[in-house]
Image: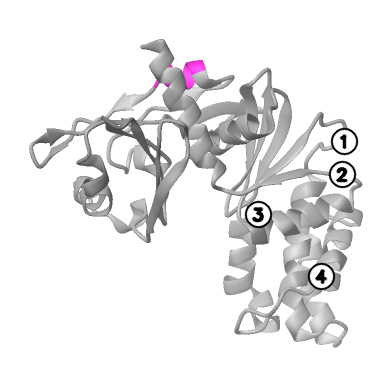
Amino acid sequence: MPDRLLAIDWGSSALRGALLDEAGRVLDQRGAARGMLTIGPGDFADVFETTFGDWMDVPGTRCLMAGMVGSKQGWLEAPYCPCPAGLDEIVRALVRVPHAARGRTREIRLVPGLTCENRGMPDVMRGEEVKVLGALEALGLDDAVLVLPGTHSKWATVAKGRIESFATVMSGEFYALLCRHSILAKSLPVDDAPFDAPAFDRGVATALDGASLMQTAFSVRTLALFERLPEAARASYLSGLVIGEELRCRPLHGARELVLVGAPVLVERFERALARRGLAVRTLGEEVAWRGLLAIDRCAAESS
């Protein structure tokens, strides 16, 4: 009988899954635009079966899911696990999903999200924790600062293999809002323009050397007004302003190891911006989520 893990990252906008063998090798992958926001109450089981039912029909296959699927609006809530948290704490907080299909009980568990306190305010993550754990495993690290850029970037501090704390920065969402719903929208091209590296670097430098984004963002309009920045370069300049602001507000010097995890287009921009602060980074793609889920699964097997 095969020993297989179906590792799933089920977020707000997308559903991704990888079938892993007992050695952790990826046998196959599937994805669909069926994130939590597209699914009605009570429909998660149907979407799961439509997407992965044939994989789960094979005896010896179990499933571990992370992401918004475990939120209050998801399939079943997996309550947040407080930081500091590592593999042991996460394994103890796994939630089993009672589900059967085609006469077979499915072995499905949900990974809890994490929570921590920042200056007396709660912060949360769901899905990013498995990427952090996967990155640590892939790079053989126990101590690091990990940056996961995105709509809501996460900055996680890891010590002795446990996520000590993290902070959420809404840079991606602010960029989208400025592009679509602010006065700056009138100065930006209607269609996506190619990345302009010099304009991006200029935006990063302006953010790092100047005032807050509340002030520097208006320069997109004024540079356009006085024809001192070509239209095709303005989105890259604004991207540099936003990412530069994110870096300006983070205490980066003295980090033992700095790791970027995410989609190539964002990782490349963050790596470029961090270089302006004299910081070298190691980079990994989002597929480290599978490695993180595998590490949790193996720890759970050892604990049982």
Mark 3 or mark 2, which has the lower sequence index? 3
Measured along the vertical axis of the image, is residue 63 above or below residue 278?
A: above
The answer to whether the residues at label 4 and label 2 have Cβ atoms under 8 Å apart is no
Q: What SS does tag 2 mark?
A: loop
* Residue drawn at point x = 34 percent, y = 57 percent: 34
Residue 171, numbered label:
3
Disc assigned to residue 197: 4
Q: Amino acid at mark 3?
A: Ser
Q: Nearer the viewer, residue 191 or 212?
A: 191
Report whether 298 appears left or right of 284. left
> In the image, residue 133 lies at what x, y percent?
57, 31
> Looking at the image, which residue is at 68% across and 80% down?
193
* Sequence-first tag of 1 and 3: 3
3 vs 2, front mark: 2
In primary-sequence order, the first of circles 4 and 2 is 4
The structure residue drawn at horizontal position 87% and vertical position 51%, both measured from the top left corner, is: 275
Residue under pointer 1: 253
Is 268 displayed left or right of 166 in the figure?
Answer: right
Residue identifier under label 2: 279
Q: Residue at x 31, y 42 (%)?
A: 74
State the separation of the CA atoms marked 4 and 1: 24 Å
* Amino acid type shown at disc 4: Ala
Q: Disc 3 versus disc 2: distance between alpha carbons?
A: 20 Å
Q: Give, as a single range, the part of the protein colored magenta.
A: 88-93
Of circles 4 and 1, the one toward us is 4
SS class, disc 3: helix
Disc 2 and disc 1 in contact, CB within 8 angstroms: yes
